[in-house]
Image (cartoon, grey):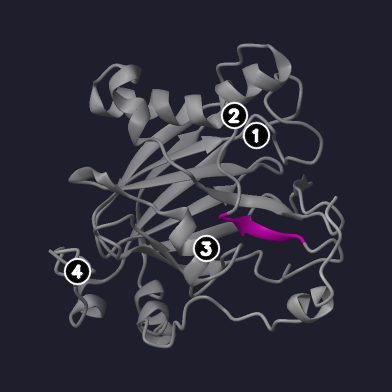
Amino acid sequence: MPTPPNDAAQRRAAKPIVCYEVEQLPTYDSAFYETARSTLQKVSTVRVAPRDAATFEVPAGHFFRIVSTEGPQVGDLNLWNAHDLTERFFSGKTRQLHASHVSTGDRLWSNLPGLRPMATITHDTLDWYGWDDDGAGVHDVIGTRCDPYTNTMLKGVNYHYCCHSNLTRALAQQQAQPTAAIEQHVHDVLNVFMCTGFTADTHQYFMKASPVRPGDFIEFFAEIDLLGALSACPGGDCGSSHSDDTTPCYPLLVEIYQPAAQTLSDWAPAPLNGYDGSHGL
């Protein structure tokens, strides 16, 4: 290891600065969302089987909930523009604009060049959890998704029910295309209900048993027309293992709700980002 320079302590003492000043982002209009929430009517339900995934569609101006039903279960969520799969959820930018874990009032942002809110979190029954003594929180945008490639590399086993494969199969079936043509559209996820953080000593990503229980849910408002896919992770509550057929796993529900039309009279879907796209040329 190189010898530290004489001014090492001074260099380490530099003050941290939050990367983005987010005061110019649209504020979370709790009165608007709560008014709309008070008129909700359920219009459809999609069941996501354990160690599998399912797709669902949410029109702009509707709400959707991901609901724990039979036991503690983590879900991996992908979102796309329902009319253009190349516009999809951007977990990295969501993390930079909000935090490593998201909850009520945070938005899920789309990738470049669209960079607009896709969905807004409007209710979260686990927002009481906050940060625990291990530095962990719930609903992270840190981890990618369990996948068969990493599993093969680390364990030497082909496991086909990782969240990446689950999401790929579900999207391929929804689009009526082979998995090879669809896999490129599967992307980094919102780890719904997952309890995660970084170790204090080695700063490694860790998971621990999720605090989710049957009846808990996280709710979103669709800021544009959405196509979603949700995988019920083979890790179950992610408190013991990843990607196997022995960990207890449970189904998840996706519920779609429509608010009364009059509550949306002054609302419009999120526009695409205003950058002119010239990149200096």
The disc label shown at residue 271, or none: 4
Q: Are marks 3 and 4 in contact (CB under 8 Å)?
A: no
**Residue in the image at 41% along x and 54% along y:** 90
**Are there few (<14), some (14-19), or many (20+) residues within 10 Å of tag 1?**
many
Magenta region, residue range:
136-141
Q: Is residue 128 above or below residue 241?
A: below
Give me the C-alpha separation between circle 2 and circle 1. 5 Å
Viewer-side label of 4, 2: 4
- Tell me the kind of residue under disc 2: Pro
Q: Dot 4: what SS? A: loop
Give me the C-alpha separation between circle 3 and circle 2. 27 Å
Residue bearing mark 3: 95
Give me the C-alpha separation between circle 1 and circle 4. 37 Å
Magenta stretch, overall SS = strand
Residue bearing mark 1: 250
**Are there few (<14), some (14-19), or many (20+) residues within 10 Å of tag 4?**
few
Viewer-side label of 3, 2: 3
Instruction: Name the spot of residue 100 as percent of width and height, x first.
Output: 61, 63
In this view, the residue in front, 129 or 14, is 14
Give me the C-alpha separation between circle 4 and circle 2. 36 Å
Q: Dot 1: what SS? A: loop
- Tell me the kind of residue under disc 1: Tyr
**Residue in the image at 39% along x and 27% along y:** 170
- First-in-chain label (2 vs 1): 2
- First-in-chain label (1 vs 4): 1
Residue bearing mark 2: 50
Viewer-side label of 1, 4: 4
- Residue 212 seen from this side: no
Q: Are marks 2 and 1 in contact (CB under 8 Å)?
A: yes
